[in-house]
């Protein structure tokens, strides 16, 4: 069973656990050898990193490998297809040169769609004819900013659609070294009201670094900027960032300064399973964050093997509301990385969302989903219906590259196997969806 919860960590900073160090831990020796081998092979391709808090307080080792938090953080054999798995395994067995292994691994990675939905091709903004590194601008109101020092995490989620940030290939990595370009871009684009600081996880940074990136947004007097969002999983994976890290109090003081400046500060917390909210350190960290005046929102994708049940989402959202969090999004697992291992059919995703939504009070019904962050925008599955005798999916846009598409319902043929927007076909005799026709025009 999980070890007893404790408020104080046993060390000053978290100790990262990787495929090179996992062998030192007693929990690892209890696992079936085939499972240990699978983790070793798959982690050559997809990044693996965990820490002692996750291992000691979140994973139930008596339930491994079915335990949801184990599935969430430890690579599984079926995350690679058989051919790829055997190929990497054979290289490891014969102790192939690192350059040979890296060439095969990179080839496999590039076949896993490392930057879906046009992130690299269509989302990178320009200023005075120059592409801006470490930024994305897909929706009018929101710019994404990737600080270079925040492009890792306390632990890696196996489903992460930004796994390409962690594999050491600068050609497929987003990162910005400083904030000057961001400030200049915001001044040139007053339609932008929100900056989302993302990664990786910005809260992996020391407060001094976080302050260096964000203070210019406060001092530059950018009137159009209303909200600063920080995408993070630290309250779930390393709550000591806000409790006992040597700069925890300084971090919270900085949050207070952001709020005092008149900007809305939203901590976009990634919570994938109710156990992440169940420990005393996590609850105390959230209490301290909220006491700064920051708002904490909760979002995560629906993930097979982890949270693909009505009960998991009901408990997650109810516990979140009880702790003062705002349920925000249920996402559909993106078409990247080990998608086939985690994906859930869209009809089932809606059933799970609807089942949990019906169990919430009005305070929890702020949540939206299931939502696909696809190339044209965030497409929500509203449900199914019969229209002119045809069973269809009813969908709409929560966000879109073209703001005029937002809120506009459309129909797709019902397909029990469909797991992503690209799997869907227009319904009612149409050849193309309306947004495809308008884009073509």
Image: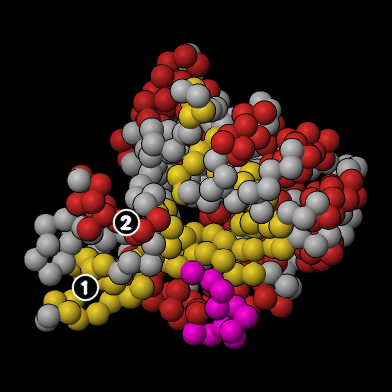
Q: Tell me the mark number nearer the camera, choosing from 2 and 1.
A: 1
Q: Identify whether 260 is placed above or below 126.
A: below
Q: Main secondary structure of the magenta part?
A: loop
Q: Which residue is mark 1?
A: 392
- Look at the image and tell me whether residue 92 can be seen: no
Q: Residue at 32% of width from left, 56% of height from top? A: 420
Q: What residue is drawn where x is 51% and y is 38%?
A: 136
The residue drawn where x is 53% and y is 48% is 191
Instruction: Give the image quarter of residue 210.
Output: top right
Left or right placement of residue 434 versus residue 402 in this view: left
> Which residue lies under the disc numbered 2?
420
The foreground one among 264 and 208 is: 264
Give the spatial CA distance, label 2 vs label 1. 15 Å
In percent of width and height, residue 372 lies at 40, 57
Where residue 440 appears, as percent x and y from the top left, is 20, 45
Q: Secondary structure at mark 2?
A: loop
Q: At x 54% / y 60%, what residue is drawn?
A: 300
Specify whether 98 is left or right of 385. right
Mark 2 nearby-residue class (10 Å; few <14, some 14–19, many ≥20) = many
Image: magenta residue range: 358-368
Residue 43 on image: x %, y %: 52, 36
Tell me, yes or no, whether the highlighted magenta stretch contains residue 251: no
């Amino acid at each position: 069973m999980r070890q007893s919860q404790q408020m104080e960590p046993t060390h000053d900073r978290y100790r990262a656990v990787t495929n090179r160090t996992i062998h030192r831990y007693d929990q690892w020796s209890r696992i079936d050898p085939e499972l240990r081998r699978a983790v070793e092979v798959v982690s050559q391709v997809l990044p693996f990193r965990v820490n002692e808090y996750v291992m000691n307080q979140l994973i139930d080792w008596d339930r491994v490998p079915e335990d949801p938090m184990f599935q969430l953080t430890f690579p599984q054999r079926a995350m690679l297809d058989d051919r790829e798995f055997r190929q990497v395994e054979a290289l490891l067995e014969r102790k192939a040169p690192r350059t040979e292994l890296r060439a095969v691994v990179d080839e496999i990675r590039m076949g896993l769609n490392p930057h879906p939905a046009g992130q690299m091709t269509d989302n990178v903004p320009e200023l005075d004819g120059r592409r801006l590194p470490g930024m994305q601008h897909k929706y009018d109101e929101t710019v994404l900013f990737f600080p270079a020092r925040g492009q890792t995490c306390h632990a890696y989620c196996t489903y992460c659609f930004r796994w390409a940030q962690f594999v050491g290939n600068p050609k497929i990595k987003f990162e910005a070294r400083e904030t000057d370009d961001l400030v200049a871009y915001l001044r040139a684009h007053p339609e932008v009201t929100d900056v989302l600081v993302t990664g990786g996880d910005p809260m992996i940074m020391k407060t001094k670094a976080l302050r260096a990136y964000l203070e210019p947004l406060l001092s530059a007097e950018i009137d159009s900027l209303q909200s600063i969002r920080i995408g993070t999983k630290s309250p779930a994976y390393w709550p000591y960032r806000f409790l006992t890290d040597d700069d925890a109090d300084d971090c919270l003081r900085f949050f207070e300064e952001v709020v005092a400046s008149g900007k809305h500060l939203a901590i976009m917390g990634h919570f994938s399973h109710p156990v992440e909210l169940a420990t005393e350190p996590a609850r105390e960290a959230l209490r301290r964050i909220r006491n700064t005046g920051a708002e904490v929102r909760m979002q995560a994708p629906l993930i097979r093997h982890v949270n693909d049940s009505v009960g998991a989402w009901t408990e997650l959202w109810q516990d979140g509301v009880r702790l003062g969090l705002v349920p925000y999004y249920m996402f559909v697992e993106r078409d990247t990385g080990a998608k086939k291992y985690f994906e859930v059919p869209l009809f089932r995703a809606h059933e799970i969302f609807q089942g949990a939504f019906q169990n919430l009070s009005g305070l929890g019904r702020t949540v939206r989903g299931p939502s696909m962050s696809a190339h044209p925008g965030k497409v929500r599955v509203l449900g199914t219906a019969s229209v002119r005798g045809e069973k269809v999916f009813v969908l709409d846009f929560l966000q879109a590259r073209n703001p005029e598409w937002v809120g506009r319902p459309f129909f797709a043929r019902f397909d029990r196997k469909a797991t992503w927007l690209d799997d869907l076909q227009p319904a009612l005799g149409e050849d193309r969806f309306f947004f495809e026709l308008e884009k073509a025009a």
